[in-house]
Amino acid sequence: MDVPERVAVVGAGAVGLTTAYDLAARGAAVTVFERGTPGSGMTGRAAGICYDAYAEDVDVTVADRAMRRFRELDGDREFEFYEVPYVFLAREGDDAGATALSEAVDRMRVHDRSVELVDADELGERFSIRTDDVGLAGVSDSAGWADPKAYVDLFVEKCEAEGVEFRVGEAVSIRTDPPGVVGGDGERVFDYDAVVVAAGVHSRAILAAAGYPIALKPYRAQALVAECDYDGPTVYDATDGSYLRPHPAGVLAGDGVEAVEADFDDWDPAADDWFVAESTAAVRHRTETAPTVERAWAGLCGATPDRNPLVGAVASGVYVATGWHGHGFMWAPAIGELLAADVLGADESVPDSFDPCRFDGDEEFEVVEGMTLDE
């Protein structure tokens, strides 16, 4: 295939915008199609947690690349990357969790991750969090967080500076032979040399309608922002599956994962009462503060059979980037670079283990959330 000169990107979330910018920066004429406004999909509901403490080599490679770029972007316009340690812990009595944590840290160290195991006393000496219930913890200093909205705003500006055209406010479909985008009325067709579908969980429906099913299931996850006085690390409690990170208001916390397939056309974007109560209690317990909930919400993550994303070509000139298990924002800086290079035929490319064609698209599999000690 000739090197594409005109490329369409469907979806203006973190991954789509980064890909669009990197394509344009490499010389392609790019148009972004977004049915809402940039960042109005799942990127706007992301937690913004970033780290490279992974146990698998491919994950480490992608996360390391993403972290380097987050740091390079810090200070570009209004974007900031906040360096904050990442603590993952298992509580006392959770022997299986402690074993899994210890094994995960061993694998992380094989990949030269700066991670150490600490007990409750040392953890308490280093950070202003409650540790009397901690059995074992891992600490990674190569971590942080960023505001997804600020990232979107930054890349919209960077895209516009590179001449990227935006077509927003209309749902579209795609054509595959030849590659193209079809307007919502079904009559207008925009021809391109290549099309990238980066529409989150909606990528499944878009590609299925074009005759290319992918192995993706949406699942619902929840988060909230609470006002409190907290200036500690990001914490993932593996025993109860909850997490929290610093936020300008105090804390952003999450869990509330429903490990079943959701209906992406009929799901509740508001947080459940039980989640708000349990998450607030978890924040109160770990930070020893009195949090007041400012806002709470739900979003959809995409699951795949093997927990690796679907990134690459599904047909000649047609590409997809989805299936993040909640890691889409933190991997966006790396995926954008790799996918743009792949589309334009550069030597560097997306890992083979992300190939979307490794599945038929009709596989039966269970939904597994993304944040676990098996990462």
Image (tube, grey):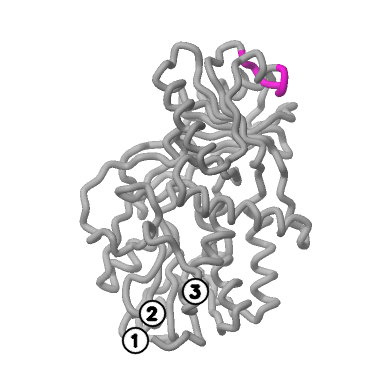
Give the main secondary structure of the magenta stretch: loop
Query: Is there CB contact under 8 Å for labels 1 and 2?
Result: yes
Mark 1 or 2, nearer chain start: 1
Residue name at image x 55 percent, y 32 percent: 243
Within 10 angstroms of label 3, few (less than 14), some, or many (20 or more) residues? few
Looking at the rendering, the stretch of residues picked out in magenta corresponds to: 125-131
Vertical comparison of 191 with 291: above or below: below
Q: Is residue 360 left or right of residue 12?
A: left
x and y percent of residue 134 in the render?
A: 56, 16
> Closer to the observer: label 1 or label 2?
2
Residue name at image x 51 percent, y 66 percent: 338
**Picture quarter with the C terminus:** top left
Tag of residue 347: 3
The residue under label 2 is 317
Vertical comparison of 347 with 324: above or below: below
Label 1 – label 2 distance at C-alpha: 8 Å
Q: Which of the pair 210/106 is nearer the observer? A: 106
Q: Is disc 1 placed on a helix, strand or loop?
A: loop
In reply to whether residue 146 is colored magenta, the answer given is no
The residue under label 1 is 178
Mark 2 or 3, nearer chain start: 2
